[in-house]
Amino acid sequence: MKAGILIILKNFLSNIICIPDAIRILLHKTKPSLSEVLLKEKVISLNQLHEALEAQKEKPCDLGRMVVDAGYADESAVIRAVKKYYGISVSRLPDNIEEVINKRQSFLEKVSNMRIPIRVKLSIAITFIIWLTILILSFVILERQKENLYQQTVKTGKVSLSYFVNNARIPLLNDDILRLNTLIKEAASVEGLLYAVIVDRDNIIKAHTDHTQIGSSFQSAAETKRLTKEEDISYFSYKLPSGANALNLSRPVAFKDKEVGTVHVGISLDFIKKQIGRESFFILVMSLLIVFLGIAIAVLLGFSFSRPISELVLATKEIGKGNFQYRLSTSRKDEFGDLATAFNFMSQELWKKLQMQKSFGRYVSPEIIDMILANPEESWLKGSRSEATVLFTDVRGFTSYSETREPEEVIEALNEYFGIVTGHILEYGGYVDKFIGDAALAVFCVPIHHPDHAERALKAAIAMQKDLQGSDMKKNWLLSRIGIGINSGVVVSGNLGSQIKMEYTVIGDSVNVASRINGLAGPGDIIISKSTYLLTKDLVSVNALPPQKVKGKSEPVEIFQVTGLI
């Protein structure tokens, strides 16, 4: 039995914290849909269910009513299924039976989906464990103490019984009633002794603690419990007419193997009940104190567990909002401390990634960033040859300008110029390759392919010049001195550099030609090559310029000045 209790206790304690989840699963399992109930109870067949559901689409109606009206099942059968599975007792099937079922289910779902904090679960679990442990221990200890007191009472009765038997032989043989009663009187003062009786072989009382009983016939107890025999001693417990609980011990008095009478001794058992009561009260008081202490400890443990979890939830929300600088305290020297350290490391790495993305985002469009972050090892990092359009911008007269200005003023003016240029390049899907002094190099169609790369570059240049010319020239003289050169052709793109420093860039003859064409553009001009013009001639108006001899080319290069879009 004890082993069974221990097994039950073990299984219960292993699952006690999951009680809400178990209840939730149980509620959901015991509350299927009406269609599932009707199928399970074989009220309708699967084909009939499909027909009823199709009919519902044409004529909205409760499934239960639809099944009955279509003649698939009797109303009583549907009512019995509803009553069995949902506990809803109705005399007739209402038209809104599914609504009634859903209302009933929604209440159960509210109960099953109640959110119980882990500190409450832990407090309940620990409190229950303490109570159950104390209850079991109290039961075992009290039962053992009760048994020990009973055995001690039996032992005391046996001692008294032996005293009377040893001293009653001769007086019984001589029928010395006076001596027998004197013997009884001497023992009557023993604590817990309710009565002592000496009878002869005819069961006539010769001595009794109650003198009025002397001479009468001895009547044994009508009902006895736990009758036990040990050699020539027999004893049992019973209730006296007065309501007292007594242990009766009997032993025959023999002389030379001849029975001359019997001695009966009654020992009170009520003191055992009183003793157990006192011990039970003491255990109850101690249990309450221990339970209150356990609750306090459970609450502290609950907060100790729930607080870092709550902090982690808050930190996760902050990370979700983009606050990658949020940090958790790592003062705890346990698994929560390890988790906080790991979380802080994660947030730090996310912050670094964000900074890299922000920094890189100043040079490339968002779609390029997404591509790079999604596929950091893809072939776009390696050398590749592709058709692209290269755009160069720089400032005319920058050298003389910078010599007559303070460095801070020059840097501020350049940053404003580069900001306008970069914004329009990114707007049209270009990639800002690099800034070279007062020049900016951008490429379209690398690393992300755009079939209309020339058109994008041309539109970016026109928007760029429009924005530059519309700015405050007096405040920033550079904005009115920007020349732009555009060329389309084959470029080689990839990572260039060393293991210490690398950059993604484009090289090739098309890049060099774009740089040379840019040198031919005056302030506010957009000069394009023939290759770019051929790709955009349907949307741009130009002025053809005389072919120009440029460095690196044996033949003059045909160029065009853009006047606007058609």
Image: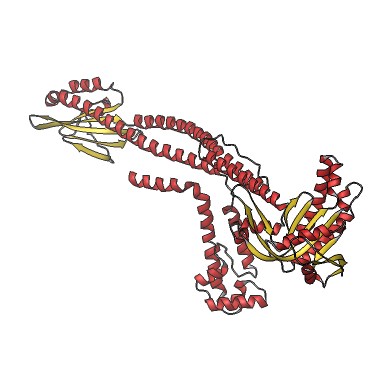
Between 306 and 229, the one nearer to me in the picture: 306
Q: How many numbered discs? A: 0
Q: Where residue 517 appears, x then y in whole percent?
A: 80, 61
Q: Where residue 149 appears, x then y in whole percent?
A: 31, 31
Between 348 and 235, the one nearer to me in the picture: 348
Query: Residue drawn 53% across and 57% down?
Result: 27
Q: Where residue 87 appears, x then y in whole percent?
A: 55, 62
Between 240 and 497, the one nearer to me in the picture: 497
Between 463 and 320, the one nearer to me in the picture: 463
Please state if 6 lies on the left or on the right of 162 as rendered: right
Quarter containing the C terminus: bottom right
**Residue 180, quarter of picture:** top left
- Residue 429 visible? The answer is no
Query: Residue drawn 50% across and 37% down?
Result: 334
Q: Where residue 354 appears, x then y in whole percent?
A: 66, 48
Please state if 217 lies on the left or on the right of 125 as rendered: left
Q: Is residue 136 above or below residue 519?
A: above
Residue at the limit of the structure toward the right, as seen here: 474
